[in-house]
Image: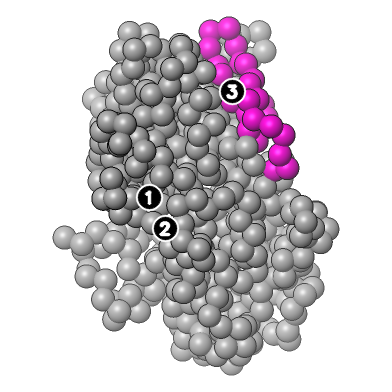
């Protein structure tokens, strides 16, 4: 059986979602609920590790959270008042059970579990050196490097060993870890990947503490937002409370701007900015920059909806649901041939002919990667009777691959890296095509124009300005060197 989404490979895919809770009677259940809220960040596999004061318990599986944790007997086995969880979308390593996080190991100081969101850009070199020193890897993921660096450290405490490991890695990451004595959260020095601290309980009660990738995971469990974990900060939560450690030198943050465009759930607040409002603002700026005469504004659902609303409000053109999304499309047994890929778009999206027929349509979407889905969407809208189809994109052209935890194609497969906007419009069959400018994106987010010398965000997929060194990548940054290739050199 082929388990794939042949119609769904033309978008940047989410990184991963992490969740941690300390001192909660229903730690496993809260973690499962939190992972449900973070399901959009990874759908390939999920895992939970709990600690009951004496033993660690683990349950992992391939598939969605609801598929893995639907059995009450499974949840009953996840005992304890502390837990961490992970939703996986693979950016390194295959989707097999031994690659499912959280990873767990027994050390001389006790048990240690870790769940990681992001990518380490020097993992291949580190892994090669660790193998030379006798380490035996159980997975093909960059995340396992943390386990072995901690094991090899000569420091005595868990936190000091973790700091020692973090000083050796390079990349964009957030992680949650669980030891016998503490729940630990870490955010990379530039804050590229998100991590948030929350609290459960009334002020006069002993609180339960929560670490999550997005605020939407706080809402589902009734937790309150406390603050963002700062870039380069380590948060240690134990029976004495919450402690902050900042072992790295100060650096200007470079939060991933694509979280606002596409990845984060619309009801989340990322680094103080409501995502829904940000997307509407981006759509309004897009209308100011590239308006065209039309009858209706139509989003490509679901991620294009807030931007299309902002575009419609700013332009005064009616917003209409001219494309209907089927939310019940899952994985398929169908062999993903080119023909099936083309037909598969119709499984996910269908045209609302009564709205589109005879209309000049502005289609709003969040991005164009390969362009294959955009072409099929434009064809579908034309076939439904639209007289004109104008495509508007709420991100700048994606011209570079991401190496920081987002799955994007190699650069030669990115449509915008190979063609100018006019050629792209012709290839997708649109009457016109426009992207928001990089300065327009920054204006929409309240940052003014982009400061090339010191940009506020990581925007490397649009600019090629990579803030974290690409140690394991070839000169053009277009291909990740395989970990297996690195190991074979040993």
Q: Is residue 233 magenta?
A: yes
Q: Residue 72, percent across and down? A: 27, 27
**Is the C-beta separation of discs 2 and 1 under 8 Å?**
yes
Q: Is residue 330 magenta?
A: no
- Can you identify the residue that label 3 sits on? 235
Q: Which residues are magenta?
A: 226-253
Q: Earlier in the sequence, mark 2 or mark 1?
A: 1
The residue at the point 76 percent across, 66 percent down is: 440
**Is the C-beta separation of discs 2 and 3 under 8 Å?**
no
- Farthest right residue in view: 448
Look at discs 2 and 3 and give the one toward the viewer. 2
Observer-nearest of 9 and 296: 9
**Is the C-beta separation of discs 3 and 1 under 8 Å?**
no
- Can you identify the residue that label 2 sits on? 480
- Can you identify the residue that label 1 sits on? 92
| Numbered label attached to residue 25 | none
């Amino acid at each position: 059986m082929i388990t794939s989404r042949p119609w769904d490979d033309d978008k940047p895919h989410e990184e991963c979602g992490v969740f941690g809770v300390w001192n909660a009677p229903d730690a496993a259940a809260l973690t499962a609920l939190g992972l449900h809220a973070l399901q959009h960040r990874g759908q390939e596999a999920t895992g939970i590790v709990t600690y009951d004061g004496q033993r660690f318990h683990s349950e992992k599986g391939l598939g969605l959270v609801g598929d893995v944790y639907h059995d009450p007997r499974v949840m009953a086995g996840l005992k304890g008042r502390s837990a961490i969880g992970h939703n996986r979308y693979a950016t390194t390593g295959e989707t097999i059970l031994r690659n499912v996080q959280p990873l767990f190991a027994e050390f001389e100081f006790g048990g240690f579990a870790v769940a990681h969101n992001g990518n380490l850009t020097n993992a291949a070199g580190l892994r090669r050196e660790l193998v030379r020193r006798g380490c035996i890897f159980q997975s093909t993921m960059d995340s396992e490097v943390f386990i072995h660096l901690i094991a090899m450290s000569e420091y005595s405490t868990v936190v000091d060993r973790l700091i020692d490991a973090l000083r050796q890695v390079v990349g964009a990451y957030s992680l949650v870890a669980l030891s016998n004595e503490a729940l630990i959260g870490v955010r990379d020095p530039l804050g590229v990947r998100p991590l948030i601290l929350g609290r459960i309980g009334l002020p006069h009660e002993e609180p339960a503490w929560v670490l999550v990738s997005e605020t939407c995971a706080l809402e589902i469990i009734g937790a309150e937002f406390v603050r963002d974990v700062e870039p380069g900060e380590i948060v240690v939560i134990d029976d004495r409370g919450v402690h902050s450690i900042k072992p790295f030198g100060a650096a200007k943050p470079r939060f991933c701007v694509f979280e606002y465009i596409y990845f984060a759930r619309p009801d989340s607040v990322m680094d103080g900015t409501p995502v829904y409002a940000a997307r509407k603002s981006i759509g309004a700026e897009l209308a100011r920059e590239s308006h065209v005469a039309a009858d209706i504004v139509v989003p490509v659902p679901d991620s294009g909806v807030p931007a299309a609303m902002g575009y419609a409000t700013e332009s005064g053109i009616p917003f209409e649901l001219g494309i209907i999304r089927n939310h019940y499309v899952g994985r398929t047994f169908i062999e993903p041939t080119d023909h099936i890929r083309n037909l598969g778009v119709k499984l996910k999206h269908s045209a609302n002919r009564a709205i589109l027929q005879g209309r000049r349509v502005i289609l709003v979407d969040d991005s164009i990667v390969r362009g294959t889905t955009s072409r099929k969407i434009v064809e579908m809208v034309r076939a439904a009777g639209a007289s004109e189809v104008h495509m508007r994109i709420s991100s700048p052209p994606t011209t570079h691959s991401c190496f920081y935890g987002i799955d994007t194609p190699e650069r030669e497969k990115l449509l915008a890296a190979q063609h100018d906007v006019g050629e792209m419009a012709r290839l997708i069959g649109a009457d016109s095509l426009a992207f928001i400018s990089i300065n327009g994106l920054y204006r929409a987010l309240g940052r003014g124009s982009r400061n090339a010398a010191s940009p506020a965000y990581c925007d490397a997929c649009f600019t090629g300005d990579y803030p974290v060194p690409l140690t394991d990548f070839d000169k053009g940054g277009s291909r990740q060197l395989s970990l297996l290739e690195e190991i074979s050199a040993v």
